[in-house]
Amino acid sequence: MEQTRAEAPIQRAGRTAAVPVAPSALRERPAPAQPPPSAVRTRAVEDARDPWNSEGDPGADGHDCHDGCDGHDGYDGHDGCDPRGGGGGHGGAPLLREAGRTPEQRRPRVRGEHVHSEPPAPDIAPPRPAPRRHSVRDQVLEALRAALLSGELAPGEVYSAPALADRFGVSPTPVREAMQRLASEGAVETVPNRGFRVAEHSPRDVAELTEIRALLEVPAVLALARTVPVAHWDRLRPLAEDTLEAAARGDRTGYAETDRAFHRALLELTGNQQLVLLGDDIHRRAHLCAVRAAPAPRTTDLLAEAAEHVALLDALTEGDLAAVERLVRGHY
């Protein structure tokens, strides 16, 4: 018995075909059959080869990183071929999307790979370094040292941080930090609830510090006289000339600084950084103690001491070890 059949078009694999359908099938629509696993694998491979990724690959156009054929181009994050969507996955839409994508976004992607789009980095200038408070402290520290060497800050007197801050035109904090550094060097003493007292030194303090300097520097210079090339000594002559100029001016503070720079340069030739730091610290303390415990030296005394630097360099340049030992021991 011949059964009446109807034909209904269905879409499969990108083409339309007329397939006979029984009338009973028109009344009840069964669930669409799932493709076999082999077809799914084949489709995944084809999608991976598709550089435009236009057939529903996960994309980067939406909030949820989906670029499928049933989504919307909006907050849902889908960009597909549904007529309700703002852009489809077929036709010219992929080309429009590709025009605004980066090379990383245009590369072929495998199904299941999520690529989140990143906004371009804003053109922002690098931040400026914040001003360092310790640079102000260092300036205050040098000013206080100069005042101590010149006698402007008198031994035995107590000075408060706020009063000194007003004098320097800074806040009390860097002044306190600088005074604490001077306290660690023995230049001042902390007075609770009052400030800092300028330390008083005796001739014995000066003698002890001078002895320590000799114990550190004399062996170092004698060893350098045997090992350092002659050309290196000429590099120290500008420093020796600076001490002569400061002595000629009668600049006690300037002489203390240039003399310390000369002796520091000598110790630096040893390559022993700890020796350099220790010798520099002892040298500063010795000069400060000498200011407190002894009368101000005359200009002729400063000139004679500065001339010993030049004579020492002459002996080192000539390789006269006996003269070097005599000069370096008599310098302290």
Image (spheres, grey):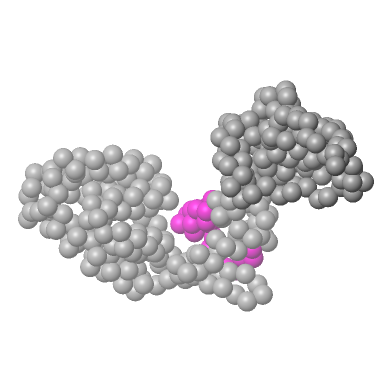
The picture quadrant where one finds residue 122 is top right
- Residue at 14% x, 49% y: name it: 228
Q: Specify the quadrant that holds the C terminus.
A: bottom left
Q: Is residue 284 a member of the stretch shown in magenta?
A: no
Q: Where is residue 30 in the image (x, y as percent from the top left)?
A: 83, 50
The picture quadrant where one finds residue 116 is top right
Query: Is residue 96 toward the left or the right of residue 259 in the image?
Result: right
State which region is magenta: 138-161
- Residue 203 appears anywhere in the view: yes
- Residue 259 appears anywhere in the view: no
Q: Specify the quadrant that holds the N terminus.
A: top right
Q: Relative to residue 178, is residue 11 depicted above or below?
A: above
- Residue at 84% x, 33% y: name it: 7
Q: Position of residue 224 (x, y in %)?
A: 16, 54
Query: Is residue 137 toward the left or the right of residue 304 in the image?
Result: right
Q: Relative to residue 4, is residue 182 depicted above or below?
A: below
Q: Where is residue 65 in the image (x, y as percent from the top left)?
A: 71, 44
Q: Position of residue 33 (x, y in %)?
A: 74, 49
Q: Which of 236 and 203 is in front in this view?
A: 236
- Residue at 17% x, 49% y: name it: 312
